[in-house]
Image: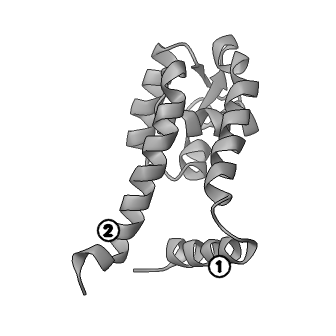
Amino acid sequence: MPFKDCLCFLVGKVARKMSRTTRERLIRYGLTPTQFFLLTALYEEDGIPISALAQKVALDKATLTGLLDRLERDGFTWRKADSDDRRAIRIHLTAKGESLREELTELYHDNNGMFLSLLSQEEKEVFERVVNKLETAEF
């Protein structure tokens, strides 16, 4: 099989293209695509424990910690010990992070819609099944 037909290469190539497009749309906010997705996850569930956030965005805790450090440094989030379990830390949006909720949520939907608009309904359904199958596969 030629390299250009390798599934890992093709998926990576598409992911990089989507990430580049997203990055360009985020420049004005000073956010990376991953930070953008973290804020989007927090818009769904502000005050989520770090462990649950890591699972939600499919990142390991070490990677997530660095990203959260930068979001906190830039004034988008803050951390607080869980009142029921002092070992657990919850991530909260600051006023700055909250102030971008409407714009970033709209960008999230526009961005996703832009990519999905390239696919027919049947292609979307097949794509979703294939991605779910690969994501849940045991290797």
Q: Residue furthest bottom?
A: 1
Q: Quadrant of residue 92?
A: top right
Q: Is residue 8 left or right of residue 21?
A: left
x 49%, y 14%: residue: 74
Instruction: Please tell me which residue lies in front, 39 or 103.
Output: 103
Residue 27 on image: x %, y %: 48, 24
Give the amino acid type for the residue marked by disc 1 in the picture: Val
According to the image, label 2 marks what residue? Answer: 9
Q: Is residue 45 visible?
A: no
Q: Residue at x 43, y 60 (%)?
A: 14
* Residue shown at the point (75%, 72%) measured from the top left: 121
Give the camera-side residue of 25 and 83.
25
Q: Residue at left 44%, top 32%?
A: 67
Q: Position of residue 93 (x, y in %)?
A: 66, 22
What number is the disc on residue 126? 1
* Left or right of residue 89, residue 47 in this image: right
- Looking at the rendered image, the quarter that the C terminus falls into is bottom left
Q: Which mark is residue 35?
A: none
Q: Residues within 10 Å of mark 1 (few under 14, many from 20)?
A: few
- Report helix, strand or loop for mark 2: helix
Which is more toward the observer, 7 or 44?
7
Mark 2, residues whose alpha carbon is within 10 Å: few (<14), some, or many (≥20)? few
Residue 22's spot in the image, x, y percent? 51, 40
Q: Is residue 139 above or below residue 45?
A: below
Image coordinates of residue 15 in percent, x first then y, are 44, 56
**Above or below — where is 115 with respect to 10?**
above
- Asked where in the image residue 95 lies, by quadrant, the reply is top right
Distance of mark 2 from mark 1, alpha carbons?
Answer: 20 Å
Q: Point out the tag, 2 or 1, that comes first from the N-terminus.
A: 2
